[in-house]
């Protein structure tokens, strides 16, 4: 079996490269063949019911310039590259979706991946199923967001699509927040305002789930209020209790994910699901727990591709 891995060639590569290498090794160890796929280099052709896909040979294999056929039998969807335009995003998204239309298993499934990578989209689904999430207001109207800051007293403001804690900030003064909201409004950006909740122990949990089972968990204690390893948080391997495990597994079920890292905080109001990560980076998790989830992820995609 030939298993594709979508990758990137931008600033994220620094964090993504080690995860990709873990996946490549796991694919080879399983007796299969890895293939790198670059979403920003794909061509999709449609003709008489046939769907074809090629990409730059230089990007994919380092060979001389030209186009080569993408021949994967299953694909691990990791990244779509840097996005600068909505139509660019939809082309790459539906380009990946075209593989599913050909009967190729993509993991995580494209539309499920899309929802889970969107902070608002993921919390809408989780909340609708009764799972505990922080109080959140999302609006394109800065005065609605301003009122939310006044009501919540202290908030976290996040981009809807971001990773590793970049662009996330905390604010308690509504008038200070208003300056940021004005900027976001002028950029035609929706404003995502979430009630700030103190995390017990000064950090939160990331629970890694693959195929509906817990692979492991870590507690990430930040140097500041942020718990992202990319922001300097220190991870420590822990055993997830029953409630934490159930919340993580249930989150993946609701979102239709084969694998993910589910971020959960223990607060005075109980556990709260903060974010879902269908493209998690696991280098901190691997160091803290001694567990490399790549082997489990590859085993899962092989199972799904054979179904």
Image (cartoon, rainbow, N blue to C red):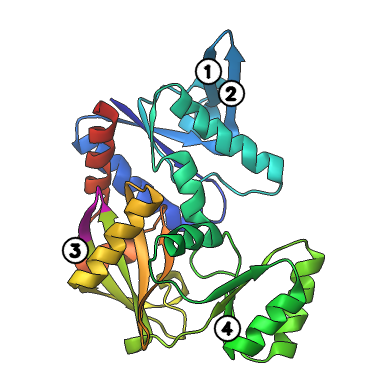
Q: Residue furthest top?
A: 48
Q: Residue at x 71, y 46 (%)?
A: 85
Instruction: From the top left corner, tell me how far across and down residue 60 is, in percent.
Output: 48, 32
Which one is earlier in the sequence, the residue at label 2 or at label 3? Answer: 2
Which one is earlier in the sequence, the residue at label 1 or at label 4? Answer: 1
Q: Is residue 192 left or right of residue 303?
A: right
**Rounded to the nearest whole Å, what is the CA distance between mark 1 and mark 4?**
47 Å
**Rounded to the nearest whole Å, what is the CA distance between mark 1 and mark 3?**
40 Å
Residue 155 got which mark?
4
Q: Are marks 1 and 4 in contact (CB under 8 Å)?
A: no
Which one is earlier in the sequence, the residue at label 1 or at label 3? Answer: 1
Can residue 260 be seen in the rendering of this structure? no
Instruction: From the top left corner, tell me how far across and down residue 277 is, in percent.
Output: 41, 58
**Rounded to the nearest whole Å, what is the CA distance between mark 2 and mark 3?**
40 Å
Mark 3 vs mark 4: in front: 4
How many marks the image carries: the answer is 4
Label 2 belongs to which residue?
Answer: 44
Q: Are marks 1 and 2 in contact (CB under 8 Å)?
A: yes
Q: Residue at x 58, y 87 (%)?
A: 152
Residue 159 got which mark?
none
Q: Residue at x 70, y 40 (%)?
A: 87
């Amino acid at each position: 079996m030939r298993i594709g891995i979508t990758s990137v060639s931008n600033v994220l590569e620094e964090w993504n490269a080690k995860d990709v290498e873990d996946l490549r090794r796991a694919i080879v160890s399983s007796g299969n063949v890895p293939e790198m796929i670059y979403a920003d280099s794909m061509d999709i052709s449609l003709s008489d019911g046939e769907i074809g896909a090629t990409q730059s040979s230089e990007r994919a294999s380092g060979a001389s310039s030209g186009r080569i056929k993408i021949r994967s039998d299953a694909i691990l969807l990791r990244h779509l590259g840097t996005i600068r335009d909505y139509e660019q995003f939809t082309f790459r998204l539906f380009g990946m979706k075209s593989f599913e239309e050909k009967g190729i298993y993509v993991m995580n499934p494209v539309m499920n991946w899309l929802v889970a990578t969107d902070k608002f989209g993921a919390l809408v689904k989780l909340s609708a199923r009764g799972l505990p999430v922080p109080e959140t207001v999302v609006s394109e109207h800065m005065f609605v967001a301003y009122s939310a800051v006044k009501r919540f007293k202290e908030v976290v403001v996040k981009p809807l699509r971001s990773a590793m804690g970049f662009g996330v900030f905390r604010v308690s003064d509504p008038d200070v927040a208003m300056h940021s909201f004005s900027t976001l409004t002028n950029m035609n950006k929706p404003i995502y305002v979430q009630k700030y909740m103190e995390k017990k122990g000064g950090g939160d949990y990331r629970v890694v789930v693959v195929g509906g089972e817990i692979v492991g968990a870590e507690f990430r204690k930040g140097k500041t209020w942020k718990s992202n390893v990319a922001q300097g948080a220190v991870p420590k391997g822990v055993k997830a209790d029953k409630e934490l495990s159930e919340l993580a597994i249930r989150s993946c079920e609701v979102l239709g994910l084969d694998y993910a890292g589910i971020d959960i905080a223990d607060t005075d109001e109980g556990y709260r699901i903060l974010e879902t990560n269908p493209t998690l980076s696991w280098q901190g998790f691997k160091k803290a727990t001694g567990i490399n989830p790549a082997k489990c992820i590859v085993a899962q995609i092989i199972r799904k591709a054979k179904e």
